[in-house]
Image: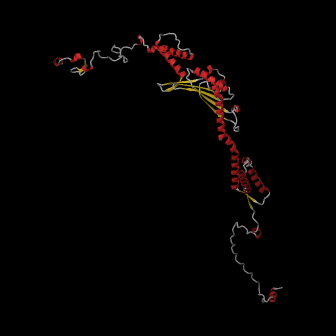
Amino acid sequence: MTQTEHNETFGLGPAPAGPVPEPPEPPETPAAPTAPDTPAPKTPAAQNAPKPRTRRVGTFTMGLALILTGAALCAGLILPDFDLLTLAKFAPLVLVALGCEILWWSTHQSSVRIRYDLLSVFVCLVLLAASVGLSLLPSLWRYYGPSRDLTETRLANELVDTAYPALRGLGLRNLSVNVSLAAPEFDPDMTITELTAEDYVGVTATLRGPFADSAEFADACAAVRGVLRGLDVKMRYVDFYCDSDTEHYELTIYNIFDWDATPDQLAGQVEHQIYLADDDAWVEEQNYRLARAYEEGWLMGSEAAPDTPVPEYDADERLQRAFAQGWQTGQENREDYRPTDEQAPDAGDDGEAPPDETAPAAQPPADFDEGTLSAAPGEGGPVYPEDAAVSPEDADAAA
C-alpha cells in the first residue's frame, strides 16, 4: 500500500508531494538522581514474616530454687527432726539445673533466641553461697563455740583435781592448767585420759619458797615434775615460778630432755634474778655474782704485790675464774695506779716542780679565829690577828 492509498483509506487526505521530512528528535531530559544505598522496598510477604522468639535462660532455675528453698525453710520450722543442714549440702544442684536449662534451649529450640537472665543467675549464686555457708556453720560453731571452751575448762579443772592430792605437801602456792583441743570434732564428755599428743596442755606452777639458791629451787621443781609425769598426760610445757620482794626464780620444762634431766642439770637452767634497791632494777643473779667477783679480783690484784698468786675466792668454778681474770687485770694495771719515783712529775722551766692539783689546799692555823679577820692597811688582803694590832701611827710610819 502506497502512502496515497494509506491516506485515502484512513481519511487523511492526499499525500504531500515530494519527500516527507523526518520529525525532529525531542530534547534529552536529565535523569532524576537516585539514592545510592536505598534498600529495596520489602515485599508484603517479608513484612508479614513472624519475628524469632527471645527466651530468658535462668528464670526457670531461679523459680525452682526459690520454691525448694522456701519449702525447706517451712519444713525446718514445722518438723523438729528435719535436717536442714543436710539439705543445704545439695545446694550445688542449682548450678546443675541452670546448666541443663541452657543446654535444652540451645539444642532443642534453635528457632528461639537465647538471652541470659543475669538477675536470675545472680540469685542462684547467692542461694548457693548461703547454702554452703549454712552447711559450714556447725563445724565453725563446734570449733569456736562455747562448747569447746567449756570442755577445755572442765578438762583443766579435772587435771588440777587429779594432781592435787599428790602435790599437797610440795610447797605449791598455785597450779594453773591450759588445755586447747586440736581436733575440730571432739566429745564434750571426754576425760583427761582421752587427750592426744596433738592437744595442747600447759601447766604453770608457782612455788612458795623461799629458796637458798637455784639448786634448792631446782630440787623442788623436780619433785613437782615427777607428780605431773605420773598423770599420763602429754604436756607441752611446765613453767615454775617463785617470786618475792627481792628474788625471782623461773624454770621452764618444754621438751623430752628436760623431763629426763637431773636436778643438778635443771639447776643450770634456772633463771634467778635479784633486786638491787640502789639501782631500782632486777638483774640476773649469776651475772651479778660474776661481775662482783671480777671487780673484787681487780681491786685486790691492783693492791697486791707483783707476781702474787691468785688467792682462793669461791668454790664455784665460774666465780673463781671471774675473780682470777679480775686479779690478772689488776696486776697488769697496778703500775698505772701506784706511781713510782721514776714516774714522778718533771720540774718546770723555772726548776720547780709544777703544783700538784690533787694536793689538799692549805689550811689556816688551828687557833685561827675567823671573827678577828681584818684587812692589812694599804693592801686590803686578809691578815692574821698579830698583824691587825698595829697602831695607826706605826702604820703611817710604815707607809
- Using the image as rendered, state which of residue 346 and residue 25 is in the foreground: 346
Q: Is residue 349 left or right of residue 5?
A: left
**Residue 12 picture location, percent across and down:** 78, 88
Q: Is residue 192 left or right of residue 348?
A: right
Is residue 329 at least partly visible in the picture? no
Q: Which quadrant holds the C terminus?
A: top left
**Residue 105, relative to residue 341: is it above or below?**
below
**Residue 135 picture location, percent across and down:** 71, 46
Q: How is the image coloured?
A: secondary structure
**Residue 178, relative to residue 358: is it above or below?**
below
**Residue 328, relative to residue 171: is it above or below?**
above
- Using the image as rendered, state which of residue 298 and residue 30 is in the foreground: 298
**Residue 321 picture location, percent across and down:** 55, 16
Toward the right, the furthest residue is 1
Q: Is residue 133 left or right of residue 304?
A: right
Name the quadrant containing residue 137: top right
